[in-house]
Amino acid sequence: MTEHQGKAPSAVTFHGGWTDFAKIALPNVLLTLVTLGIYRFWATTRERQYLWSHTRFIDEPLEWTGRGIELFIGFVMVFFLLGLPLVIMQLVINGLVFQGQPLLAGIIIFAMIMFVFYLTGLAYFRALRYRLSRTYWRGIRGGSDDEGFTYGLSYIWKNVVAAIPLYLLYPWASMSLWNERWSKMSFGPYQFQSDADWKALMKRYLLFYLVPFLLFVGAIMIGVSAAASGAGGTPFSTAGGVAAAVMIIFGVLGIYILMPLAALLYYSKFMRVAIGALRIGDLEFDFTARSPDWILYWLGNLAIWMLAYGAAFAPFSIFIAADPTQFAQQLEAGESILSFGLVIGILVAIIPIAFASSIIRYRRWKFFVVHTEAFGEVNLDRMTQSTTQSASHGEGLLDAFDVGAI
């Protein structure tokens, strides 16, 4: 198959709908709630089965073959192999501090931080490896024979090097890690190749990097304006006071709007450069989402979260509005405000937030699929099954550190 950008139909398409997905997401939320979170591993599997099966590559659907029990086993392994040791080490550190050995305690803390940092990199690698090994297309799967242990070390030293010049080398570190991670993956008999150039990111990154410095300069200008306005009178009775108020408003807008926007512009460029440099066999990829597409996607997610939190707080509002005087008296007296109605309200409040999280995951998958293109040729006669190892457990580290494969 040969694709030509802008003329031929897309090789990667998505045929799902959020209303159909919601029929899966809402029962998942309810079952996860009544099982105190245990069902979420099977809920994740159901979501992926829907998303994968409604994604087509060259008119053939993907298939997710992962199981909920694999994710559950991965979570349990991380809990016992990571969670409990960290709790024990925390107790040891507290004991060393009380015994007057702060230096030894500091060394252990530093070692723990490096260990967690290493596991974060390992989680990125192994999550991608697991997802590829459970993704099938025409009966062929992906994976990697690399366990990811050397990648964890790369994750540490490359981020340390990036931090030395005040994080000016962060684009190099992130793109280098992307290239290393994908270059160790394969699908069927073909190895992925990635040689994305980090220097293409520097303009967008410097824009993001300079925003805090501009806000700092603005803070200095506020101080100068306030000093020039004099100490007498009300804050807004002089031109300097008004200028200071205006600068404060712009500073707040800068923190909550300009910085996220600059970060979004950088991430938009990162994904275009990274995916555009990804190849496998005779196939090349492209990512067509531009900055306006990312902004609209982000605003849509923001609107969903606002609706979800509005719906979540509605039960509390009703509970308080039922008898606001008694509620205020209990708070003033320091009495417990817990009641059966409040507990029910808390449980009900979880539903819209969890449901919104599922819809956000649906939107993320659809966004990436819709804006991903593939060009080149696929020789189906040469497509053989992958011989890479297939892990028996899922993404426990991914859940523990809350990082994504992409």
Image (tube, rainbow, N blue to C red):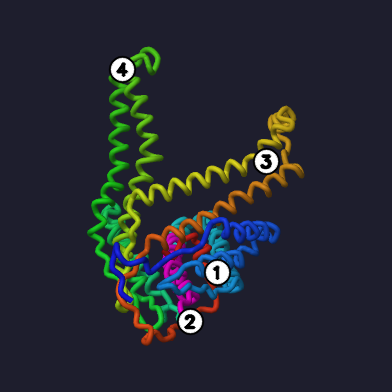
Q: Is residue 334 left or right of residue 104?
A: right
Query: Where residue 322 appears, x then y in whole percent?
Result: 73, 33
- In the rendered structure, which segment of residues is drawn in magenta? 110-139
Query: Where residue 126 appears, x then y in whole percent?
Result: 45, 72
**Residue type, mark 2 in image:** Gly
Q: How many numbered discs, if any? A: 4
Give the residue pinned by disc 4: 239
Task: Look at discs 3 and 2 and give the one toward the viewer.
Answer: 2
Query: Where residue 361 appears, x then y in whole percent?
Result: 50, 58
Return the disc, 1 or 3, that comes first in the chain's sequence. Answer: 1
Q: Secondary structure at mark 3?
A: helix
| Residue 180 versus residue 330 in the image, above or below | below
Residue 158 seen anywhere in this rendered image of the structure: no
- State how far apart marks 1 and 2 are (Cα): 15 Å
Give the residue pinned by disc 2: 139
Residue 60 seen anywhere in this rendered image of the structure: yes
**The label number, if any, that marks residue 39 in the structure image:** none
Q: Residue furthest top?
A: 233
Return the disc, 4 or 1, that comes first in the chain's sequence. Answer: 1
- State how far apart marks 4 and 3 are (Cα): 46 Å
Return the disc, 4 or 3, that comes first in the chain's sequence. Answer: 4
Give the residue pinned by disc 1: 49
Q: Secondary structure at mark 4?
A: helix
Q: Is residue 200 left or right of residue 318?
A: left
Specify few, some or many for label 4: CA neighbours under 10 Å numbering under 14, 14-19, or 20 or more. Answer: some
Specify few, some or many for label 1: CA neighbours under 10 Å numbering under 14, 14-19, or 20 or more. Answer: some
Q: Secondary structure at mark 2?
A: loop
Residue that appears at 44% across and 85% down: 385
Give the residue pinned by disc 3: 315
- State how far apart marks 1 and 3 are (Cα): 33 Å
The reply to whether the C-beta atoms of the residues labelled 4 and 2 are less than 8 Å apart is: no
